[in-house]
Image: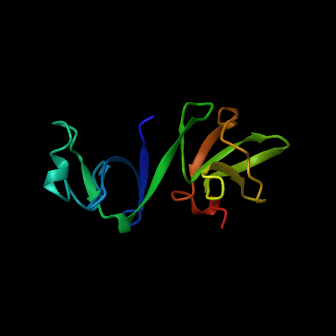
Amino acid sequence: MLPKYKAWDKVEKIMCDVRIINLDKGAFLEGNSPSLPGIVGDSDIVTWLPPGENTGHFCDFEDIVLLPSTGKIDSLGIELFLGTVWRGNIKPYDRDYVVEWDYENAGFIFRTKLEKYHAPSLKHALKGNVIGNIYDNPEMSLS
């Protein structure tokens, strides 16, 4: 599986698909920044994209939160990323869960908003639906 990322642009307050990550410079995000017309950033990065696919904006790492894909999809075919809020049933719990990273076990987990219950894996993803993320909807955050 190829790594796939989304990014929360902390400056513009928008969620974007990540087109390119340059570990020295930052990330090139899909779509134009609402406040900055056209392409912004390093011209070397823009030339890596196929012609006609270079619409986007460049961000420094300090201005974004990189959100890796879990590689899982929900019952409607929507991909789950770090920070996704998912509504479903992991028996006996029927509630909202947030996709988090479990540092102790080095893997993605579901965590409830009400309890510190950790599902053993994301194998339940097909039994529920993505309802948002903690960046567009901070009221859904666990903190």
Circle count: 0
Front-lying residue, 95 or 37:
95
62 relative position to 133: left or right: left
113 relative position to 138: left or right: right
Q: Residue at x 26, y 55 (%)?
A: 57
Residue positioned most to the front: 105
Where residue 120 sits: x, y (%)?
Answer: 73, 45
- Classify 114 as above or below 124: below
Front-lying residue, 12 or 41:
41
Q: Residue at x 22, y 39 (%)?
A: 53
Q: Residue at x 83, y 40 (%)?
A: 91
The quadrant in which the C terminus is found is bottom right
The quadrant in which the N terminus is found is top left
Where residue 89 sits: x, y (%)?
Answer: 77, 40
- Classify 46 as above or below 8: above
13 relative position to 73: left or right: left
Q: Residue at x 19, y 51 (%)?
A: 45
Where residue 122 sits: x, y (%)?
Answer: 65, 41
54 relative position to 6: left or right: left
Where residue 84 sits: x, y (%)?
Answer: 57, 49
